[in-house]
Amino acid sequence: MRQRTKIKSLLQSAETGFETTVKGWVRTFRNNQFIALNDGSTNLNLQIVVDFENTDPAILKSITTGAAISVTGQVVASLGKGQKVELKAASIEILGDSDPEKYPLQPKKHSLEFLREIAHLRFRTNTFGAVFRVRNTLAFAVHQFFQERGFVYLNTPIITASDAEGAGETFHVTNFDLNNVPKTAEGEIDFTADFFGKATNLTVSGQLEGELGAMALSDIYTFGPTFRAENSNTTRHLAEFWMIEPEMAFYNLDDNADLAEELLKQVIKEALEKNTDDLEFLAQRLAEEEKQKPQQERSEMTLLEKLQFCLDNDFERLTYTEAIEILKNSSQNKKKKFTYLIEGWGADLQSEHERYLVEKHFKKPVILTDYPAAIKAFYMRQNEPDAEGRKTVRAMDILFPGIGEMVGGSQREERLDKLEQRMDEMNIPKEELDWYLDTRRFGACEHAGFGLGFERLVQFVTGMGNIRDVIPFPRFPKNAAF
């Protein structure tokens, strides 16, 4: 079998004077002489020079946009602009035809809306090729980051009987015949007859199970799919998405924030170094998109500037209470330019508030800590009430330009009595989480962790406006194609 060379390596090396074979898909074929060939390893095409006078007319006729071909020939210096090398074809084999009358991806600009309608083919475009190569780099960089620091990669369950967030927006898992669901004498669904013998759902987070691992292995991380049955059709929500969730024993909130900042900086740096061409293409795409927006809605930074901005600045750290004072006294709030006005302490911050702090006030990424207990989950460590009797928890959110919250985390409540008291206040049944409470009964220690939504990270790094465009097969209300 003849060795195939990836187009990316040919273009990067710019070496000439040798024979090789390339395989890929035709982007364009001009004048029966020049093929732009792409194999997905890069957004850049390799120019194939065809000796059309000595090539079978049937083969020439089959070289259409979208066709898969194999070309063997000599790598030579290119006479044209835009590439250093090209391939002088000695032989061309048609591997798969593509009917130009029916193939929907013609050599022209297609809208993202149109590409979502043919999502099974969108990988073949420059935009989505770039997005998913960047996604690949980021995923590998996440694993590399934790592995270099001795973390254990833990697979937490996708099917679970717990709702870690207490949100109740879960997908139920059952093997019942839905036309004949068993009922108890009281008329309730009899889950004891179901496959697992109890009500189960798809996980919304691997955190609680991750804590069990951290209480024995010290430092663990999960990286897997999570599910939220939120009937939301916005550009920021998915029903299935991937979460990175580390849990660390003997960490406090400051240690937690340090690790999260370090992680974000390292994976962004990896993408900038390894996906230069892709990010330059995506930056150009975003700049064109920005031109269509009103001036006041345009970003002050280009995509590459925004990424570098996160590397160059130490993240600003302040408490929720300090942030509320800044927001309440801001001209945006006083002039009623916020959609959700900040009246005072206790408000749940919206994306517009988070972006104001990052983009207008501090002009750097922000880590907010010590949120009101009333708006946070039961497992977060409780602070002593402040001078005004206000109750807060050791929570943190990391806020980024253009996107708002990137990371959410906390120091976990390790004190059994405090945790049980909080669960009672929030009507969370302790008997169902008795396994979780055991981590506080036997060898409890200070510990912390956070969650990073992977698609949100990919969205930030690629500059894509819709989260559905950064996951290969998006799941959202009324859509589960493929």
Image (cartoon, helix red, strand yellow):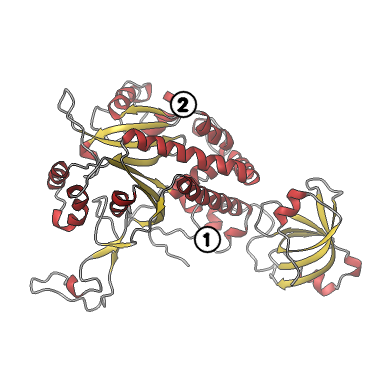
User: Which tag is nearer the camera, tag 2 or tag 1?
Assistant: 2
| In-image side of 240 versus 175 (left or right) | right
Residue 243: tell me if it is visible.
no
* Residue hosting label 2: 363
Query: What secondary structure is marked by label 1?
Result: helix
Residue at (27% x, 26% y) in the render = 321
Spot occupied by residue 169 in the image (x, y as percentages of width and height): 28, 55
Residue at (20% x, 71% y) in the render = 197
> What amino acid is at disc 1?
Glu
Query: In the depicted view, which residue is nearer to us: 452 or 33?
Result: 452
The dot on residue 147 is: none
Query: What secondary structure is marked by label 2?
Result: loop
Residue 4: tell me if it is visible.
yes
What is the C-alpha distance between the residues marked 2 and 1?
A: 38 Å
Residue at (14% x, 50% y) in the render = 427
> What amino acid is at disc 2?
Lys
Q: Is residue 93 above or below residue 447?
A: below
Spot occupied by residue 112 in the image (x, y as percentages of width and height): 55, 52
Kindly give the residue lying farthest to the left in the view shown: 186
Residue at (34% x, 51% y) in the render = 217
Q: How many marks?
A: 2
Pointer 2 with pointer 1, Cβ within 8 A: no
* Residue hosting label 1: 117
